[in-house]
Image: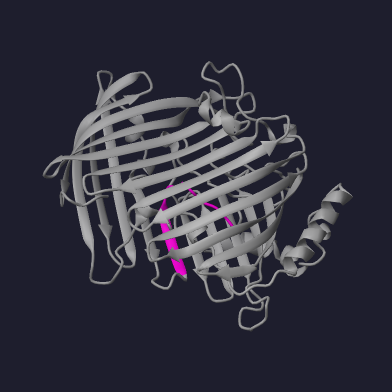
Amino acid sequence: MNVILAPIMLSIPVITHPLPFPRCFVSTSLTFCFRFTFLWVISLACWSNSYGQAALFGSLDDPSDDMARSKGRSSSIFEGGVGFSLVGPQWYTGGSIEYSRRTSPYYLHLAGLVRAGVYGAYLPDTDEFYDLVRLVQSARYGSPTGGKYVRIGPLDRTRLGAGHLVNFLNSEAALDAKTVGFEVRLASKSVALEGFSENITSIGLIGARLSFQPFSGTSSPFSSLSVSTTVVSDQKKRLSTNNPIDGQEVGIRMQAYSTGGFSFNPFVSVARLPGFGQGIMFGADVAHDNFVDFARLHFRLALHYNSADFKSGYFGAFYTVNSHRAQVVSEDESQREGFDLRSIERGNSVETELRMYVFNRFEFWYSFHRYHGIQPLSEYHLRFRFLADRFNVSIGQDRAGLVGFKSLFESLGDENRLRFEFEYRLVGPLWTRVLADYTYVEVGKTVDSLPKYIVQRRFSPIVVLRYPSQRSR
């Protein structure tokens, strides 16, 4: 927890001067300052009742981590499997073992895979002590009231606030080098603290967000007004040696209207990468936390205005393999994919997002960040999961380097991370599972001693014995 609180203390000047934002977020453009001041005043004029967006924080609402709904109802699943695994150009035989337990308010999922081929064992599976840590897929606690949440496991969908700085952060883009991190959320009626770390055994990328509702205990129209500040710091590889913080963000959010359980929640966010650029984001969420006791719904429309040397969601799905601390290169290693921060030009973008979660059965989460500029900086994220009695399907995909919506149907490119999982019950406790991954593998160093990664395709068909046989993972 001290790791999380440290960057918050460094951000106190931002918190204690909420009104003069231009002092805290220095911009070389007066237009930028005027736009933010105007939008901030407009957002304060909105009438409100209450607001909550806990479901969008990290894996708090991840259906793959679904826990028992009530005390006294718990379950455990054991399984072992054998099959084949294609890693790049090489086939291996593989064996897997998994254990998961659901109870209230805890969930635990452990999983391991060991492979061997004609040239011996696949060394990245067992070549370091950290491979034991990687057995932890998820270990979490969530209080029944929702005020406390702690999760240890690989990060896959970590987001802080509106996602202006941290959005769909992933710590397993390179599977052989994936790290086990943690997420934590502590909330009361008026204050919420959210934080994450990409690694539980060392200090690398860390971030925290503190939000405060100053009028939550009143009947004022501004009772749901929430003011927040976010800080991000990468201790593994600093973005700027002149500043202890790599990213700063402040935001304002409130509920403007509510009817039939649906709420309309406008927000404004200003983010800055010290020594680089800054951006402003404003938009609105339409949400329903419990639609006819059946589903949770969320829709977002937001606009981004960015200066040069700034990218919305910079700490995102490809951060560990393609940022200031690593580079993705083409498969023939002839060129870098994506853009260095210093080469990003000023531009604007439109973000659309839709999420529907049918409790215990189905999730569809689509997010598209359409960049309007001369550079291909659009991004796309998809999370899909469907659970049935006889089969399960799960898809997670992140793509970058896109232009418009049409480019989603073109070649996948080298900025692409995909995990596809399909399970089918053959008979009794016998299941078959197919895993397909677009991941990254390190192929050397750049002239600046940064790791270089290329896309690697993996395919693993496995036959599994599961007990109890009817339970879905």
Coordinates of residue 127 in the picture (x, y in percent): 35, 34
Write down the quadrant of residue 360 in the picture: bottom left
Whether residue 344 is visible, yes or no, is: yes
Left or right: residue 72 compared with residue 231: left
Q: Is residue 45 within the magenta segment?
A: no
Residue at coordinates 47% horizontally, 48% vertically from top-left?
365
Write down the quadrant of residue 339 in the picture: top right
Left or right: residue 348 compared with residue 115: right
Coordinates of residue 82 in the picture (x, y in percent): 19, 33
Residue 125 sits above or below residue 149 on the image: above
Residue at coordinates 50% horizontally, 26% vertically from top-left?
412
Coordinates of residue 390 in the picture (x, y in percent): 21, 45
Residue at coordinates 53% horizontally, 15% vertically from top-left?
332
Residue at coordinates 27% horizontally, 24% vertically from top-left?
92
Q: Residue furthest bottom?
A: 218
Residue 334 sits above or below residue 277 on the image: above
Q: Residue furthest front?
A: 260
Residue 47 sits above or below residue 160 on the image: below
Given residues 31 and 323, the one toward you in this image is 31
Q: Residue furthest right?
A: 30
Given residues 236 and 104, the one toward you in this image is 104
Magenta span of residues: 148-161
